[in-house]
Image: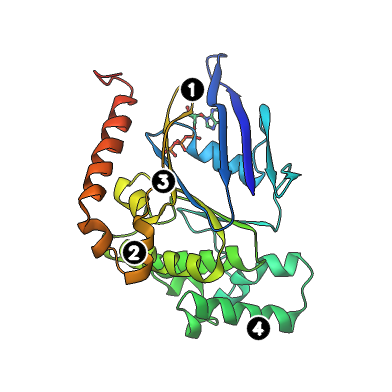
Amino acid sequence: MLKVDHVSIHFAGRDGRAVHALDRVSLEIPERGFVVALGTSGCGKSSLLNAIAGFLPVSEGAITLNGRPIERPGADRGVVFQKDTLLPWKTVADNVALGLKFAGVGKAERRARAEELLGLVGLRDFGRAYPYELSGGMRQRVGIARALATDPDILLMDEPFGALDSLTRETMQELLVDLWQRTGKRIFFITHSIDEALLLGTELVVMSPRPGRIVARFKPDFVQDFAREGRALAARARPDFAELGEEIRALIHRSEPGSLAA
Ligand SMILES: Nc1ncnc2c1ncn2[C@@H]1O[C@H](COP(=O)(O)OP(=O)(O)OP(=O)(O)O)[C@@H](O)[C@H]1O
């Protein structure tokens, strides 16, 4: 279990006043859970993800993974960002195996594991290519393979498909749901897209800013239809898909700065 227990994160703002990026946020991600956070810009989504990753210390509260407190980055958490962070001078296979190298895994095993992971993300023949030879979608596939390399307990994904064109994004959503089913990893995923959140999440947490809080939680089951069909069509066709989407849209708009409903 990944457990975020009453976590607050404060930053010193430029005017000297504290910025409450997160205020007593609690969250649990069970095995095979796919939790999606969404909300307006500045509601603390990335701060929450960075704290789970161990990049950012919490001001109050605690985060534990299988009972162990998270205090620093670790191989039990794989991270994927919107912008790929591949090393341009290394081949795709070497990029995928980077975490394994740090973990002291030998060359032959690294190579075999990279090949296996590249097969899993549909890039079997690209191990010797360099990142500049790949499209944006392909680079994100490499990023996902790299995040999976150390066989982490959880995947942390910060708007991983936010910079992709809509067709590539759909393909990547299909790939991720397939990977999720096959690997059984728990996932924490950030998006600005209500459609994407509904399609992917087993739990959606809607956040609002200043201070960053969870204002609503939903447990939709559209991802089961998506996984079964391999396509989003059946899930999107359900009347409750649009209804829940509208409910979440209204919630988010209400929390926007300057909103008349705020
Ligand atoms: N290092 C920092 N120093 C000071 N303030 C910060 C820092 N990082 C984030 N903040 C502030 O904390 C709040 C939450 O930021 P965060 O990036 O977590 O939000 P977000 O929901 O991920 O936003 P976005 O959707 O735009 O990525 C914002 O008000 C932001 O300005």
Distance from the alpha carbon under mark 2 to that under mark 4:
31 Å
Instruction: Quickly name the residue at label 2.
Output: 226
- Residue shown at 47% from the left, 68% from the top: 141
User: Is residue 230 in view from this perspective?
Assistant: no
Amino acid on which disc 2 is placed: Phe
- Assign the C terminus to one quadrant of the image: top left
Foreground residue among 98 and 90: 98
Res. 204 image quadrant: top left
Say what secondary structure mark 4 lies in: helix
Which comes sooner in the sequence, label 3 or label 2?
3
Which comes sooner in the sequence, label 4 or label 3?
4
> Closer to the camera: disc 4 or disc 1?
1
Q: Which mark is residue 112?
A: 4
**Count of numbered marks:** 4
Question: Please, which colouring scheme is shown?
Answer: rainbow
- Residue shown at 62% from the left, 30% from the top: 7
Distance from the alpha carbon under mark 4 to that under mark 1:
46 Å
Amino acid on which disc 1 is placed: Pro
> Closer to the camera: disc 1 or disc 3?
3
- Residue shown at 28% from the left, 29% from the top: 253
Residue 45 versus residue 111 in the image, above or below: above
Instruction: Quickly name the residue at label 1.
Output: 211
Say what secondary structure mark 3 lies in: loop
Left/right placement of residue 149 relative to residue 222 reads right
Amino acid on which disc 3 is placed: Lys
Instruction: Quickly name the residue at label 3.
Output: 219
> Closer to the camera: disc 2 or disc 4?
2
Amino acid on which disc 4 is placed: Ala
Say what secondary structure mark 1 lies in: loop
Quick check: marks 2 and 4 in contact, CB under 8 Å? no
Which comes sooner in the sequence, label 2 or label 4?
4
From the top left corner, tell me how far across and down residue 258 is, in percent.
Answer: 29, 19
